[in-house]
Image (cartoon, helix red, strand yellow):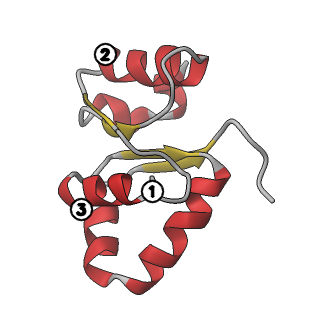
């Protein structure tokens, strides 16, 4: 089902940076199995979308260009100013990006 809605997964193995807890469905079942089934690469984040902890994901995104970016609405809220103000970061971030979406909470 996932491959039908995201056919690009059959072309290039997915690359994902993820901080979600593995005791929840999204982090464990969805993200881990997505990477496992499609032979991708999963980078496990030490940071998360909270004040004082978001710098770690930003540093990691400078090193790794994901093919999928998933976050909670607050994470996008924190990411947008960086994307607007840092051209080098923005170019790296979108260089391989194929899907970007949010889950877990509603948008404000």
Residue 3, x across and y down, in percent: 46, 24
Report helix, strand or loop for mark 3. Answer: helix
Q: Is residue 81 above or below residue 98?
A: below
| Circle 3 crowding by C-alpha within 10 Å: few under 14, some 14–19, many from 20 | some
Report helix, strand or loop for mark 1. Answer: loop
* Among the two numbered marks 1 and 3 on one chain, the one whose residue lies closer to the N terminus: 1
Mark 2–mark 3 CB contact (< 8 Å):
no
Q: Residue at 24% of width from left, 62% of height from top?
A: 62
Q: Is residue 41 above or below residue 105?
A: above
Q: Residue at 65% of width from left, 39% of height from top?
A: 103
Residue 54's mark? 1
For marks 1 and 2, give the CA distance: 26 Å
* Among the two numbered marks 1 and 2 on one chain, the one whose residue lies closer to the N terminus: 2
Quadrant, the C terminus: bottom right
* Among the two numbered marks 2 and 3 on one chain, the one whose residue lies closer to the N terminus: 2
Relative horizontal placement of residue 24, taking residue 11 as reference (left or right): right
Give the residue pinned by disc 3. 62
- Residue at the extreme front: 52
Give the residue pinned by disc 2. 36
For marks 1 and 3, give the CA distance: 13 Å
Mark 1–mark 2 CB contact (< 8 Å):
no
Q: Residue at 50% of width from left, 44% of height from top?
A: 70
């Amino acid at each position: 089902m996932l491959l039908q809605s995201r056919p690009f997964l059959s072309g290039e193995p997915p690359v994902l940076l993820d901080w979600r807890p593995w005791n929840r469905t999204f982090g464990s079942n969805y993200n881990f199995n997505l990477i496992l089934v499609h032979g991708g690469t999963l980078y496990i984040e030490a940071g998360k979308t909270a004040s004082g902890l978001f710098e770690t994901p930003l540093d990691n995104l400078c090193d790794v260009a994901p093919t999928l970016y998933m976050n909670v609405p607050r994470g996008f809220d924190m990411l947008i100013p960086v994307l607007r103000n840092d051209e080098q970061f923005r170019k790296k971030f979108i260089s391989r990006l194929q899907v970007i979406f949010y889950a877990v909470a509603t948008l404000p």
